[in-house]
Image (cartoon, rainbow, N blue to C red):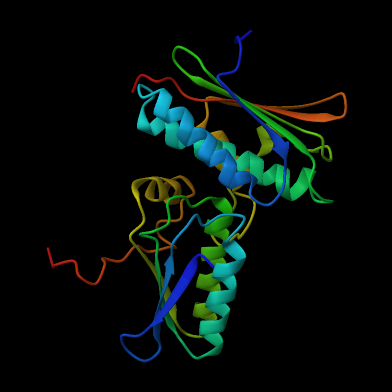
Amino acid sequence: MTGSPTVVLRRDTGPDLLSEVRQTFRSLWESHSTIPEAVRAEVMLASGEVIANIIEHAAVDGPVDFTMEVTVLPDEIEVKLVDSGREFHLDLDAVTMPTEMAERGRGLAIALALLKTLSYKRIGGLNHWTLRSGPFTE
Amino acid sequence: MSIRVSEGPLPGQATLHVNASLDLTSAADLRAAVEALVNDGVKHVTVDLTGADVVDSTGLGALISALKSVRKNGGDLRLVGPNRRVRMLLELAKLTDLLKIADPPDTPPG
């Protein structure tokens, strides 16, 4: 139980989604100045990587419904991403960084490296991703 | 277009100035710009990331694709001006040996 989200973005996975997500985070940082810069950067980058996966895989047939809920907790940030696209068939425990000459396949490995936890579930025909940042304390 | 091209200062050299996020929405622009330069005979490409506020894994993939293109033509690719977050990403992805960061041209020798 994490309480009400601090900010909610509800829209589709159209072409300017990543830009609007980043703007949503920037607005959130303005009203929560105590969140360390490192945590801000990690949450924005990790969220962007998961959302890029949603756009490329879950929404491969065209835009789908998308919701992002960000909750600022006392010592960490929780991001919940829900979309109505195709199901992901993946094992997050098996995700590794690809070889250096690979042009694809780094997104989830980067997100996993940046976050305290990253989880995925398929519930009721929707994809549910939950991201938790590292603590605010350095 | 978030990428501007300036050729030179010597023949066979060019700089790509990335002036927005280098991500899913702009990676194809970078790939296309490098392909065009390689087809024009440019061998040495510098990617100026001074104006790139965000680079993600798709952007890294485009840089690796660009590096492969110029190397195939006997050239090389260097980065200049990545911000702290982009440097962190390069380290996290273990790409600091592959995607070399050069000093900007106006940096005095240390």
Measured from the top left, where is residue B91 in percent x and y? 41, 48
Measured from the top left, where is residue A71 in percent x and y? 56, 19
Q: Quadrant of residue B32?
A: bottom right
Q: Is residue A22 shown above or below B49?
A: above
Please report the residue visible at 81 percent of the width from the left and 50 percent of the height from the top: A62
Q: Quadrant of residue A21?
A: top right
Residue A69 at least partly seen = yes
Measured from the top left, where is residue B4 in percent x and y? 45, 73
Residue A96 at least partly seen = no
Residue extending farthest to the right is: A125
- For the residue pair A118 and B23, the one nearer the viewer reads as B23
Q: Is residue A71 shown above or below A38?
A: above
Measured from the top left, where is residue A99 in percent x and y? 57, 55
Report the side of B108 relative to B46 (left or right).
left
Q: Quadrant of residue A4?
A: top right
Quadrant of image for the N terminus of chain B: bottom right
Please report the residue visible at 83 percent of the width from the left and 37 percent of the height from the top: A87
Quadrant of image for the C terminus of chain B: bottom left
